[in-house]
């Protein structure tokens, strides 16, 4: 089993689980395995991003790698650039987590590395020695421009004139891309959470806290909410109704099918997506296939099934004909394109996909492996006729996530609380 890499790269609390020394060793290992390749490195707005970048790049350079620094840039932008330049991409970000966390994601030609390759990197890190070669490093502001220009070409013809859009940038990396693209397409844009200070990323704002922007939606046609690295997108309608990933995937999938862009009439989602989405798609001749949580696993499922579209309820959505990874800005632009082509309001679109009552609770634990306890599995089996239940360990935090879904909201809440209690009891031993 992997020790360092989780569902989305290496992630942990800076200075504890994730240190400068660990970043340095990762740089050495990547340089030893792939140097003198080109590595594009970007990061979000956390105060720990630059120390980690300095340590990582030191290791890369000692092994003769070529490095281009992109500065603050969203994960999907680094992914797209690494595909366009046929190189590696590294993103220093902990996505939607608080500022105390950080992470390192490694990509190649736009795609996250498979689990097996991440295991090999870990093995090299265990015994890697300091290097003596001198690589090269430069800051390249054109990397950001390359992403923006590519996106604008991809959506040429999309005219957002007359639309008033509110954007919650989560005090994160989206400050560098989303406002500029929306303005270039003609939208009237007002930005919130746009002044990062190193510690306010995702703090009571962004896709994790839609209540912040929902109080400020008066007079806007659409609200766009990103997380810290802008690979997520959650939307708010004109009446502040939340349009999460399941609802976005449902209505957009139907549009993609009409346009011949939905390969194999298949959508790939995770075990966390609501059955309401599954039923909505099935009624329209579209199959939903579920995979385990994590956008890298959504992508793997898409590639295996020959699908072109998939994502997560959290707002990680992949349009494979547009990009290789979840991109919150692309998701927002596709939804805006749908609004304009159908003439439907956000209120109409948000109602199309029904949400069956679902409760998701987080249980802090000492040992995340408790999620695999046989007692939990037996209790889940007993309840399967009436509820859809998922108990899983978080890929990034010391939590066990309990999801319960069913037709009666009161019963769903009761069962979810019972499973949380059971997790706590088993964790205490």
Image: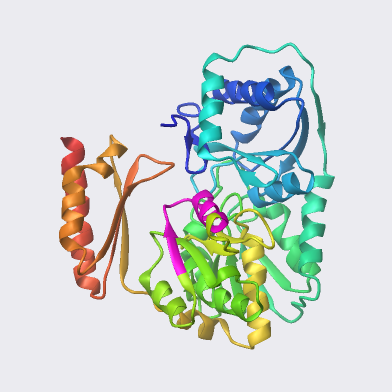
State the image quarter where residue 330 is shown. bottom right
Residue 298 highlighted magenta (yes or no): yes
Q: Residue 62, how many percent across, how many down? A: 72, 17
Query: Would residue 56 appear left or right of 296 to someone viewing this image?
Result: right
Q: Residue at x 79, y 44 (%)?
A: 85
The C terminus is located in which quarter? top left
Tell me if residue 291 comes above or below residue 353 in the rendering: above
Q: Residue at x 65, y 55 (%)?
A: 194
Query: Would residue 369 appear left or right of 317 to someone viewing this image?
Result: left
Query: Would residue 367 appear left or right of 322 to someone viewing this image?
Result: left
Q: Residue at x 56, y 80 (%)?
A: 238
User: How many marks are shown on the rendered structure?
Assistant: 0
The answer to whether residue 112 is visible is: yes
Q: Residue 183, how many percent across, how many down? A: 77, 68
State the image quarter where residue 283 is shown. bottom left
Residue 293 highlighted magenta (yes or no): yes
In the image, 187 versus 372, the foreground residue is 372
Q: Residue 96, how many percent across, how many down? A: 51, 50
Tell me if residue 360 comes above or below residue 406 in the rendering: above
Colour scheme used in the picture?
rainbow
Q: Residue 138, how many percent across, how many down? A: 82, 32
The answer to whether residue 195 is visible is: no
In the image, 335 versus 111, the foreground residue is 111
Q: Residue at x 56, y 27 (%)?
A: 121
Tell me if residue 162 comes above or below residue 88 in the rendering: below
User: What segment is highlighted magenta in the picture?
Assistant: 288-303
């Amino acid at each position: 089993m992997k020790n360092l890499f989780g569902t989305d790269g290496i992630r942990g609390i800076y200075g504890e689980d994730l240190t400068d020394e660990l970043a340095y060793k990762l740089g050495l290992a990547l340089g030893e395995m792939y140097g003198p390749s080109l590595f594009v490195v970007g990061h979000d707005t956390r105060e720990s991003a630059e120390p980690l970048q300095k340590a990582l790049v030191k290791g890369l350079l000692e092994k003769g790698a070529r490095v281009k620094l992109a500065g603050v840039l969203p994960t999907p932008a680094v992914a797209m650039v690494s595909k366009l330049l046929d190189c590696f991409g590294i993103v220093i970000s902990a996505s939607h987590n608080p500022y105390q966390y950080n992470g390192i994601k490694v990509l190649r030609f736009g795609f996250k590395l498979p689990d097996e390759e991440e295991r090999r990197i870990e093995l090299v890190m265990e015994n890697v020695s300091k290097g003596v070669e001198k690589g090269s490093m430069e800051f390249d502001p054109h990397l950001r421009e390359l992403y923006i220009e590519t996106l604008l070409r991809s959506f040429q013809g999309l005219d957002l004139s007359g639309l008033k859009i509110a954007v919650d940038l989560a005090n994160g990396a989206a400050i560098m891309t989303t406002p500029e693209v929306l303005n270039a397409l003609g939208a009237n844009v007002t930005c919130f959470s746009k002044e990062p200070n190193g510690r306010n990323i995702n703090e009571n704002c962004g896709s994790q806290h839609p209540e912040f922007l929902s109080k400020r939606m008066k007079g806007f046609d659409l609200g766009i909410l990103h997380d810290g690295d802008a690979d997520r997108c959650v939307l708010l309608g004109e009446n502040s109704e939340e349009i999460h990933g399941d609802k976005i995937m449902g209505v957009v999938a139907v549009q993609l099918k009409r346009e011949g862009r939905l390969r194999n009439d298949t959508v790939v989602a995770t075990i966390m997506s609501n059955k309401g989405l599954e039923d909505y798609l099935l009624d329209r001749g579209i199959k939903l296939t579920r995979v385990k949580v994590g956008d890298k696993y959504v992508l793997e499922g898409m590639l295996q099934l020959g699908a072109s579209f998939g994502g997560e309820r959290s707002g990680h959505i992949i349009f494979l004909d547009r990009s290789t990874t979840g991109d919150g800005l692309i998701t927002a632009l596709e939804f805006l394109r749908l609004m304009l082509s159908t003439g439907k309001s956000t209120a109409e679109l948000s109602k199309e996909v029904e949400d069956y009552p679902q409760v998701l609770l987080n249980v802090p634990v000492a040992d995340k492996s408790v999620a695999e306890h046989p007692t939990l599995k037996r209790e889940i089996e007993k309840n399967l006729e009436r509820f859809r239940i998922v108990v899983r360990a978080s890929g990034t935090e010391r939590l066990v996530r309990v999801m319960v879904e069913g037709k009666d909201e009161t019963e769903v809440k009761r069962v979810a609380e019972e499973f949380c209690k059971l997790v706590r009891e088993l964790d205490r031993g």
